[in-house]
Amino acid sequence: MKVTETPPAVPAPRSPVTKTDAPAVGAARSSEGKVLNVFSHGVLIIWAVLVVMPLLWAVMASFKSDDSILSTPWALPDRLHFENWSRAWNQAHMSDYFLNTILVVGGSLIGTLLLGSMAAYVLARFDFPGNRFIYFLFIGGMSFPIILALVPLFFVMNNMGLLNSVHGLILVYIAYSLPFTVFFLTSFFRTLPTSIAEAAMLDGASHTRTFFQVMLPMAKPGLISVGIFNFLGQWNQYMLPTVLNTDPDGKVLSQGLVELATSQGYKGDWSGLFAGLVMAMLPVLAAYVVFQRQVVAGLTAGALK
Amino acid sequence: MQHGKYRFIAGFLVVPLALYAIFVIWPFAQSIYYSFTDWTGLSPDFQMVGFDNYSRMLDDDIFWKSLQHSVLLALLLPLVTLGLALFFAFMLNVGGRRRKNAAISGVRGSSFYKVAYFFPQVLSIVIVALLFQFAFNPSSGMLNETLKAVGLKSLQPDWLGDPDLALYCVMVVLIWSTVGFFVVLFSAGMASIPKDFYEAALLDGADRITTFFKITLPLLWDTVQSGWVYMGILALGVEAFTAVQVMTVGPGGPDYSTTVLPLYVYQTAFRDAQAGYATTIGVGLLIVTMLFAGIVMKLGRRERLEF
């Protein structure tokens, strides 16, 4: 209503179509602004190059021969050496590492989301003695340094016969993902409206049925956020498998890559190592480019609360 | 209904709680106990030795070296990372002037920068460390080749092999991989600052530096503070362990110049078979972590602002 009275100094915030520059801000400062502009644009571009270059360089190196990686690191490949990729995939066991990682992460992700949402739902929606205590017991886990528990954990796993097994690793991943998952989903379940759940209960649905058929579908956005967070964390896990999973056939991707790097150091198969690295990088990078918004939301959701 | 309710609650809590108790709580409780024993980790026999491990730790040169490195990381990493991230986030969200007819907006191409900067965050620290290990390679790595190419052939540092440089190389890698996360986090925080604050400052003739220090930083302080704690825990914990373990010679070398506390715990327990002493160092690490978080929280509280 007051559109015509908008002071000229501040351009109307919501009119992105018109492209007229607003010249009213003092001209004296424009030179200062320019120096700052050149400087800050320069820094922004430099950082972008610093971030993207190593990744592009790795992709390029994965298609080169060993000689040219070492002698002319900045040159383009003479031809695309696809044999690096097949060598890494077959002989360096990247295929096995991939399969192991998918099994472990798949199992633990499903387990984390299911168990995490069950615990969070109960803690968020029901009053019972000990509710607060259990909640803080879970939350406290976020501040523990994992390395401290690692030594006893090794022997707990050993005594239970769970060392060097896929299901053992899955259980540990789930346990260490629970603190953040419960923390995040508890606050999420609190924000969901109660009326729909109450209606379902009136219609005769049990608590369990209400949870699985009404509440869980409603919590989907929260599950996606926390799911992405856990997926990246578990996919990239290195310390837990290094200690708890030393069986050469059961290695996960991150362990396999380190193994590849140490043994390749002697054999000098750098191109194979780079092919392996890029192979491990590409799925997450591709997923990030496609689901960018969700990934960013999922990873930053916890820190902003 | 009441009976059904409690059965339901118990049914939903029992599995998650059991897992959590067995694999997280129980090992933590045990580790405090083991820190008072001479347990090797190999045989089931051990004895209580009271505070022997603790007094040994205080006389251990390598412990003090690792502590020094860990503390240096916990102080320097957040400073550089958050500083860079604040600058980038400010430029990307508020730095642009008179674009799109909005008083406040990011510089040109800000959405591209936000996507690109976040890239390293989704990669595992192992991949990043391996990549940089090659870049730091003194004879054929990217860095020295670049130095050669621009005519600085005489300047060919041994990067990870030089005790004075190695720890800083590790630091660079950790900074490289986390700045993007904080750029995005701070961007989200800046988006929630009311636009009229900026417009008012603009009308009063404030330049960008003033705007940043008088408006953006104070209103973003809570986010910066939790970022500081997060980054410090990362520098004292898993990420620093992984980077040092994968990248450095030894690992932890050369000559213990890059050993950090978590790595020392790991080596003492699984390489030297001194599980009892390792948990003692672990308790030391826990204390340092708690102190760090406590100090940051306390220092930060004074400057808290509401809007």
Image (cartoon, rainbow, N blue to C red):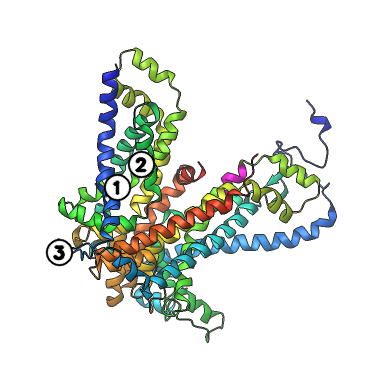
Mark 3 Cα within 10 Å, few/some/many (few <14, many 20+)?
Answer: few
Give the distance between the C-alpha atoms of the residues marked 3 and 1, in whole angstroms. Answer: 23 Å
Q: Amino acid at mark 3?
A: Ser
Direction front: furthest residue: B50
Q: Residue at x 48, y 57 (%)?
A: B292
| Mark sitting earlier along the chain (3/1) | 1
Is circle 3 on the same chain as circle 1? Answer: yes
Image-quadrant location for residue B19: top left
Can residue A238 be seen here? no
Q: Was residue B295 drawn as part of the magenta stretch in this picture?
A: no
x then y, percent, for residue A202: 35, 12
Residue B54 in the image: above or below residue B162? above
Direction top: furthest residue: A203
Q: Secondary structure at mark 2?
A: helix
Q: Amino acid at mark 2?
A: Leu
**Residue B43, disc:** 3
Which residue is under mark 2? A137
Q: Amino acid at mark 1?
A: Ile
In this view, the residue in front, A86 or B50, is B50
Which stretch did the figure color magenta?
Answer: B186-191
Magenta-drawn stretch, dominant element (helix, strand or loop) = helix
Give the distance between the C-alpha atoms of the residues marked 3 and 2, in whole angstroms. Answer: 32 Å
Which residue is under mark 1? B25
x then y, percent, for residue B150: 56, 80
